[in-house]
Image (cartoon, grey):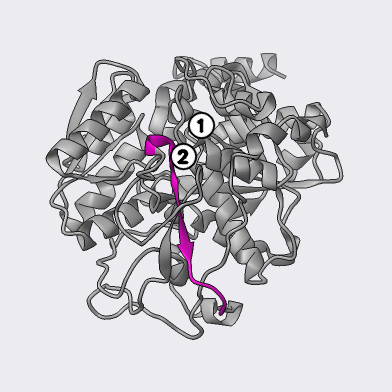
Amino acid sequence: MSFILRNTALLRSITSVIVRGFTVIIGKLPLNGSGKMSMMTNVIGLECVVCGRHYPPSDIWTCPNCGQAGILDVRYAATARFTAADLAERPHDLWRYQELLPITATSQLPPLQVGWTPLYQAPRLARELRIKQIWVKDEGRNATASFKDRASVIGVARALASGAKTIACASTGNAASSLAGIAASVGLPAVIFVPEHAPDPKLAQILLFGATVIRVQGNYDQTWELCQEACAHFGWYNRNAAVNPYLIEGKKTAGHEIAEKLGPEIPDWIAVAVGDGCTIAGVWKGLCEMRQLGFIPRLPRLLGVQAEGANAIAAAFFSGKAPTPAPAATMADSIAVGAPRNWRKALRAVSASVGTFICVSDEEILLAMRVLGRQAAIFAEPAGAAALAGLAKASKLGLIGTHEQAIVLVTGNGLKDVKSAMRAADKPFTLPPDLRQLITFFEKSR
């Protein structure tokens, strides 16, 4: 377990990961006829992950005392609970966890279906990886085909509540197409900043949803900085999850769903691809909340998976030092982050879970895309398959035992990046329309 102990120095500067408490109102809290939530928010404040200072609920993005390093965490009031019986009568989307979300009685909620994505058992995949049991959570089934929809619906709801006229974000693709679609569903103008290497299928989504797209001649980190400056200058609502603390509250609902669906069968590990650090931190927060509510008897360990060419958070985990920004180089564009902003939340989540990080090559990601398709019939983009690549590698290295169970979080659909999918897949066979040649082909291929 030396990989855990090497973090000690860094962890002293990071506040405890365990969610300190929240109010959960007993009984049914349905949507009212206007599409607004019939409840009041349970948010009591924001806490800086660096200095621990507390702030009242507001749309401040980072701690005024710590600057951009001072990422904030949303805190909820403590003590009551809801039950499985309460949830049974609620819609199958992320709003079923309404008491644990930063929305109010006047929040206008985007109408698109987000959340309650499938959680499949994959026995053939488990046999191939030599792991006792594997579940695959397919986030490509969300409204715009990625996990990022969970964050975008919260961002759009809060933008509308604040009276914002425009919402903006910087993204390598998924957050951008997600925001464009969710914003379009309520008629809110969106400005999207993407780096020049963003895949065309994702750009097509964004443009068809009607967003204004700024294609920046630079990498993701330069694109992100420009978006930050533009939001400050124009007064746009900032959807960037790396600094907007409310966005993780949407992402954590994946953890809620896993806990609700599996209950006492919660597995030993959850593998999550990591870019900025928001997703894995959000999933962990959701799991912690459901553990406190009694839905699961224990917490699983987290396996954070980074691409070898974009591994700043994994390097920090093992070195005990803050991440060193560096150019990102990986085909998995959704996790191609060279200067992660939310690394503290990611590190404290993985460490609190007694988990670890692992890095995978682009070749391993391509293989995982192929294996996931053939053994579980799930079409994943590179970042979505990265979690499986990490799980496979961890199994080979003995970090995960043959007696253990795991969940793979697939964060995006393969149609998001068809070019990479074609690299991962076998090539088709070309034959003339002649049955005799077809028969000969199959005879030779036996």
Residue drawn where x is 67% and y is 23% of the image: 319
Element type at mark 1: helix
Horizontal placement of 358 versus 159: left or right? right
Q: Nearer the viewer, residue 360 or 58?
A: 58
Residue 442's x, y, as percent? Answer: 64, 20
Q: Is residue 436 magenta?
A: no
Q: Nearer the viewer, residue 29 or 425?
A: 29
Horizontal placement of 346 versus 353: left or right? left
Q: Nearer the viewer, residue 424 or 146?
A: 146
Q: Nearer the viewer, residue 445 or 128?
A: 128
Residue sitting at the far bottom: 27
How far apart marks 1 and 2 lie (CA) works out to: 7 Å
> From this viewpoint, is residue 370 visible?
no
Q: Which residues are magenta?
A: 67-81
Residue drawn where x is 36% and y is 24% of the image: 221
What mark, if any, has residue 412 been given in the picture? Answer: 2
Q: Is residue 69 magenta?
A: yes
What mark, if any, has residue 383 been given in the picture? Answer: 1
Earlier sequence position, callout 1 versus callout 2: 1
Residue 145, placed above or below residue 97: above
Element type at mark 2: loop
Residue drawn where x is 20% and y is 38% of the image: 232
